[in-house]
Amino acid sequence: MSKEKSAADKLREELLVQNKHMAKVVSDDEINKAFEFSKGYMSFMKKAKTEREAVKEIEKMAYEKGFEPFVPDKKYKPGDKVIYNNRGKAVILAVIGKKSIKEGVRISAAHIDSPRIDLKPNPLYEDSELALFKTHYYGGIKKYQWTAIPLSLHGVVIKANGEKVEITIGEAEGEPKFVITDLLPHLGQAQSQKKLGEAIKGEDLNIVVGSLPLKDAEGGDAVKLNIMKILNEKYGITEVDFRRAELEIVPAFDPSDIGFDRSMIGAYGHDDRVCAYPALMAILDSKEPEHTIMTVLTDKEETGSDGNTGLNSAYLKYFIYDLAAMEGVPGYRVLSKSECLSADVNAGFDPTYPEVMERNNSAYLNRGVVLTKYTGSRGKGGTSDASAEFMGKVISLFERAGIPWQTGELGKVDEGGGGTVAKYVANLDIDVVDVGVPVLSMHSPYEIVSKLDLYAAYRAFYEFFKD
Ligand code: MN
Ligand code: MN
């Protein structure tokens, strides 16, 4: 028997924001769909740990769905599906809309690079009969989190003859892994007195890669020589080839369900593949959209979006200009009429560390996609700050489609902050707001997200494309 709602209860519902766990709002069917969707995501995550691997996987999935490589001078018709590969590290997928390009395009933009550890150009050295790699970390990491965990090596090496060698080692069953050492607690007393951020230095992130000397070799480099011999036999490379390589060290963990109820996923690189994957699936599943729709999956966000595969470069603009030229429309006119969901993660509220968050303006796991009006730091420095009008448009879209949504801010004022690709898109004169998934332990080797939020993100991008 349901109790009659009091006048106050009714008024509360009418006037106040209701923060609800998604499981209390959505149907059992939707929860099942979210769990099912997560399986596809986890298998993608296992195969796509670097931006290059993500691009390969995305291309494969897109070709299966009828996408074709983009040809700039070709005339495309509504419903045509194209994919543009930017140097193997970023992609744009587009489906041509029924409306003229003059009406603008709908963009979902996520990034497929994640914080990691890169090899230096002269990485290999021997010290005390151990062979090691020198590294330079990529993006924002807490260095101590990367010691004493299994690591794998991914990337490409260009040989003197121009041949590209692709390397992935430490992922498949039975393959060796790598590790960064840490001090034992018995000898770590001085280390423990240091500040957390200083206890492990950048130059301490040395990767152990071998310990056996080449038989009969004289001199102090017999272990290094033996490693180079192994690499030469396996990949045909020599030491100088490291100087024309991009080799990345990432955690060797597999994605996994988290919790007795399996409601969460632990994985390396949720930031930002937990948005890239649903933005990808949304465009793969879209049919005959009104506007031309695009999913941009970019590189270099974690180092500030600079570089020709990052969104601070002109590649997205050039792509849109090519589509505009097809209809004889000036490119800038298309940009000015376009809208974008900048698909990036936000920090989820962590009950173990409540002191850095402001409870009323934090994102919570399982409350749906996070709308982040602005990022930046210290007085909104370095953010595009979405307009009230565009917030209104996106919120009403979510409300109409029944997509659970919440708002978020990256920590307390003046305590932290960060950025996304949103401002680079906004600077093209496009309306943009950040929409993504809340993450726990962001930028750590093993981040956590909720399956329900992941699915809400898919629905959000899908509905945005349909609009
Ligand atoms: Mn991100
Ligand atoms: Mn990040």
Image (cartoon, helix red, strand yellow):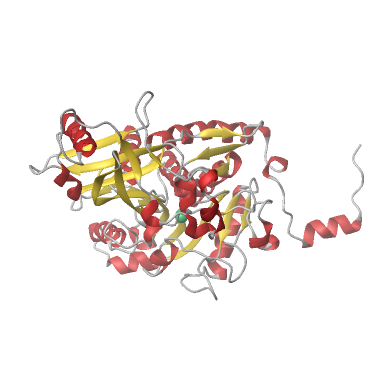
Please state which of residues 458 and 453 is positioned toward the viewer in this rendering: 453
Residue with the most extreme bottom position: 379
In percent of width and height, residue 425 lies at 39, 64
Residue with the most extreme top position: 174
The residue sitting at 46% across, 52% down in the picture is 143
Viewer can see residue 210? yes
The residue sitting at 66% across, 55% down in the picture is 353
Please state which of residues 226 and 259 is positioned toward the viewer in this rendering: 226
The residue sitting at 25% across, 45% down in the picture is 125
In percent of width and height, residue 177 lies at 37, 33
The N terminus: image quadrant: top right
User: Could you say which quadrant of the image residue 359 lies in?
Assistant: bottom right
Image-based side of 395 in relation to 289, left or right? right
Relative to 251, say whether 433 is above or below.
below
In percent of width and height, residue 215 lies at 18, 28
The residue sitting at 23% across, 57% down in the picture is 326
User: Could you say which quadrant of the image residue 230 lies in?
Assistant: top left
In percent of width and height, residue 299 lies at 34, 53
Viewer can see residue 70? no
Please state which of residues 389 and 453 is positioned toward the viewer in this rendering: 453
Image-based side of 179 in relation to 134, left or right? right
User: Could you say which quadrant of the image residue 61 lies in?
Assistant: top left
Please state which of residues 435 and 82 is positioned toward the viewer in this rendering: 435
Image-based side of 257 in relation to 226, left or right? right
Say how many tags the image has: 0
